[in-house]
Amino acid sequence: MGSTQADIQVSYDVDNEFFRLWLDERMNYTCALFEGTDNLEEAQQKKLAWLSEAAHVGKESTVLDIGCGWGANLEYLALERKVKAAHGITLSPAQAAEIRRREIPGVTADVVSYLDYKPQTKFDAIISICMMEHICSPAEARAGKSIEMYRNYFRLAHAWTKPGAYFGLQTILRNRVPRIPQDLKDLGWVTYEIFPGGIVPRLEEIIAAVNPYWEVLEVKTRRLHYKRTTEHWRQRLRDHEQVIVEKWGRKRFDDYDRYLSTCVRGFEMHYQSLAQYSLRRIDS
């Protein structure tokens, strides 16, 4: 089951204007790639470029974005990569509304679970950016179900694509368990209060679960890049503290400041990391 639609709405349907204050201009809510820049907008563009390359996206490609957020990657695919068509799926009505508001040429989006999604045609490529964190719940992970749930996700992605397809994937990773009580408390709070219903996968779970559907061609870990991303977000959040408190209340600001500070700490202490993958469809 993982995150239900109600869980997703807790995480993402807070208020589009709230997120717009502290994310980059396209509203990427995932790790940026700080290679040769410390500018968040440029770093997010580099992240999207890396994933498009990993998915072998070209001008004639039809691309599925699983967990498409507010449309940052869909917009990049349409305007920068000039793809033939890009389709996104999300469980967040607020995110889908933002995509429709942007009126991006060649882009469509559905509010649907990946478990229920039935594409009309098969895709040339898939990109999915930090959606897998919502596939398995903490209780399901404790019950040993994570790999089978991730494998089912990769099975579905295989069924939605044409032979020869590539997959650009990005996931947060669960590394070490904190031994410092406050760090453990903060990470637990983020898991259950900010992102209920989901849990971050481990790298070895992803590597095991892709079989027999996808071949792993490349894996890049980006732990310090996500630390830097969350530092940027936290600073932008703090720059807008007065506006946030006036419009959404002190608790909203304090909760998100705690969440982002926990992220910075988590990536610094190796509790969490970030991986990008290039996968190739196994055709038998």
Image (cartoon, helix red, strand yellow):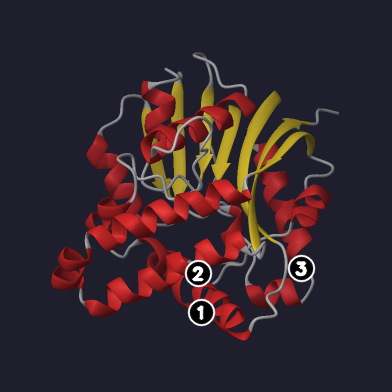
Residue 23: x, y in percent?
Answer: 34, 49
Q: Secondary structure at mark 2?
A: helix
In the rendered image, the quadrant that contains the N terminus is bottom right
Q: Secondary structure at mark 1?
A: helix
The residue beneath circle 3 is: 145
Kindly indicate whether the residue at mark 2 contacts the one at mark 1 (C-beta within 8 angstroms): yes
Mark number for residue 262? 2
Which residue type carries mark 3? Answer: Lys
Q: Residue at the spot x=60%, y=60% of the render? A: 268
Residue 253: x, y in percent?
Answer: 29, 71
Q: Which of 277 and 74 lies nearest the eye of the viewer? A: 277
Q: Residue at the spot x=74%, y=64% of the render? A: 146
Q: Residue at the spot x=37%, y=31% of the render? A: 75
Which residue type carries mark 2? Answer: Thr
Q: Quadrant of residue 58?
A: top right
Residue 252: x, y in percent?
Answer: 29, 74
Residue 141: x, y in percent?
Answer: 72, 71
- Relative height, residue 113 to residue 156 (above, below): below
- Relative height, residue 11 to residue 105 (above, below): below
Cα distance between the residues tagged 3 and 2 = 27 Å
Mark number for residue 189? 1
Which residue type carries mark 1? Answer: Trp
